[in-house]
Each structure stands twice: as structure tokens, then as C-alpha cells.
Amino acid sequence: MKVGVLTGGGDCPGLNAVIRAVVRAVDNENGQTIGLLEGWRGAIEGNYIDLNFENTDSIIDRGGTILGSSRTNPYKNPEDVERVEKTVNDLGLDALIAIGGDDTLGVASKLYSERQLPTIGCPKTIDNDLSSTDQTFGFDTSINIVMEAVDRLRTTAESHRRVVVIETMGRHAGWIACYAGVATAADYILVPEVAVDVDRMCRILEKRRAAGKLYGIVVVSEGAKLAQNEDFVTKDTEVDDFGHVKLGGIGEVVAKIINSRTGFETRCVTLGHLQRGGPPSAYDRVLGTRMGIHAGRLAVKRDFGKMVALLGTDIISVPLARAVGTMRQLDMDVFGEVEEFFE
């Protein structure tokens, strides 16, 4: 058996753990693994490297992906879809494992349903917003990075009697902001799932200041909106191959509102790509490894059109078509618990 593997979309801690585990699972069944370079771009152009035990065994502690990544979308150009199919046939691939988020896996799902290509999905995103899996690898590392950053910013905020607004990733779901905010005792958390109550936020900050807390911490998801039907705050009007705008700037907007409403000196820090860089946590190394093993086993069994997923503590498989297209938003029961501190 010959298996191809690719990593698409934003880089994420734990990707190399998945790659390593896929190689091992396939190798144990006397199969061969190749890595398509830079996501779907490699599948279009036929660029690949051979993967084996020797060149993947020591990559588990490395962030990013040794295969490179891109946001290339084959379905933007019908000819590119033909090229992907040609690459699969020319390389003699019996299976193609796509590791990525909703966009990358959406392509894999369409290639399976429309072209009958032997695709398998492995869910990846630090946003933790993919449906059909309880958690994605990369999320744990991300919230720990945000936690450490806020812990460091707290000393500056306290020393200068400031409010600091920390903008995190989270386009459609507030998992990162919520969990990191709880872990750092943030005074207020803003997420995409809940309409922002500016009056309440400022009232809480003023109440805390009056009670003797001389600084404030506010954590906001990049996808939070200040009004029900308001558009995202974006860096510019450019979109990627999947039609997504580049978010960024809501933190600055919130900081200006707080400064204006309360008179408290307020600064914004946007963590950006820092949140998904560097070595993966132990949890993400283990989760990535387990998902990679099961993705490799699906390939060996020729069980295509599936995605591996975490259900409780078990790794299961679900239909790719069911796993894509719907965002897994923040659990409102969790956010309801967090709101105990917003009084």
C-alpha cells in the first residue's frame, strides 16, 4: 500500500506528531508513505518527499509541519481538481490523508464524493471549532501560550494601573478566549457566540477598580462583534482561496471604547501567530499521535471518506461529509459558568 499525507491551512502544534504516527502505522503493515508538500498545492503540482521511520521519528517535539502548508483551494480552478486526481494516479496512491481544518477537509470530502478519490481526514485547528470531534490537537498548546502571555502582561498592567485587552484567535468560536480567560482570571471575556455588552464590560471594570483592583484584563476573540449584524473587524479587504478575510483589530476597538467610557488607560496586545507557534504540549503530542495512528489504520483498511475524531477519550471515525461545513461553537454551558465572574 502507498499512502500520501498532506497538511493544509494554518500551521498547528501537533501536526508533526500526526505525520510521524501515520508513517509508523502504515510502515507496520509494510506500506509506504509519501508527504505532499504545502497542502493541496503539492497535490496539484505533484511535489512530494518520501517519509519513513528514520526521517520522522524525531519530529514529535517540533511545531509547524515538516511538509509545509498553504491555503490553496483546488476547487477555485476546475483544472486543479483534475491535477489532484492525476497526481494521485501518477503516484499510485492507495489513500490520501488530509490533515487540516474545515477548508482542507472540505476539499477532501468533495474529492471523495465527487471523484471517488480515496481520502481520509484528520482534524486540525487551534480554534477547536471543528464539528464531530470533542477536541482538536493544537488547542491545548494554544491556550497555554495565551495563558503565559497574559500572566506576563498582568505585571505590566498592574504596575501601570492599566487595563490590557488581549486579542486571541477565534474566527467563529470563542474556545481560546474563553479557556485562556478563565485560566488567567480575566475580568471580562468577549466571544463570537455572545453579543458584546459594552456597558456591562465597562461597569465591571469600574466596579473592580472601585473595590481596589488597580488594573484590568480583558480577553477578546478576533471574531467577536460589537453589534448583532456587524461585520468582522478586518485588517484589509483581501481574501484567501477559500474566501476568508484576514481578521484583526477588534482588540484595538475594544481598548478605545474602554478608555473612552471609563477613563482608564487601556492598551491592546494582539497575540496573532504566536498562539500557534512553537513546540506542542504533551497533550497535543499524545492526541496528534493517537489520531495519526487511527488515520493510518483507516488507510490500511481502505476505509475512505472518513475522518478520525475524539469522542470522550476514544478515537473514532466519522463520515467526512458530516464533519465539515458546520462550525463547533463554544459550549454555552461553559460560558454560563464563566459568567459567574462577570458580576
Image (cartoon, rainbow, N blue to C red):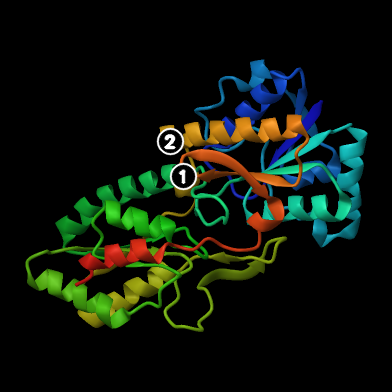
- Image quadrant for the C terminus? bottom left
Residue for point 74% across, 37% down: 37
The one nearer the camera, 168 or 6, is: 6
- Residue 234 figure quarter: bottom right
User: From the viewer's perspective, is 304 left or right of 233?
Assistant: right
**Percent x, y of residue 282:** 42, 32
Q: Which residue is mark 1?
A: 312
User: From the viewer's perspective, is 259 left or right of 90?
Assistant: left
Q: Which mark is residue 283?
A: 2
Residue for point 8% across, 73% down: 210
- Image quadrant for the N terminus? top right
User: From the viewer's perspective, is 340 left or right of 38?
Assistant: left
Q: CA distance from mark 2 to mark 1?
A: 14 Å
Under tag 1, what secondary structure? loop
**Percent x, y of residue 237:** 63, 72
**Percent x, y of residue 63:** 52, 35
- Indicate whether 134 appears above or below 342: above
Marks 2, 1: nearer the viewer:
1
User: From the viewer's perspective, is 165 left or right of 26?
Assistant: left
Residue for point 26% across, 79% down: 200
Q: Is residue 71 visible?
A: no
Which kind of residue does numbered mark 2 sit on? Tyr
Which kind of residue does numbered mark 1 sit on? Gly
- Indicate whether 337 appears above or below 54: below
Label located before the other in sequence (2 or 1): 2
Are there few (<14), some (14-19), or many (20+) residues within 10 Å of tag 1? few
Under tag 2, what secondary structure? helix
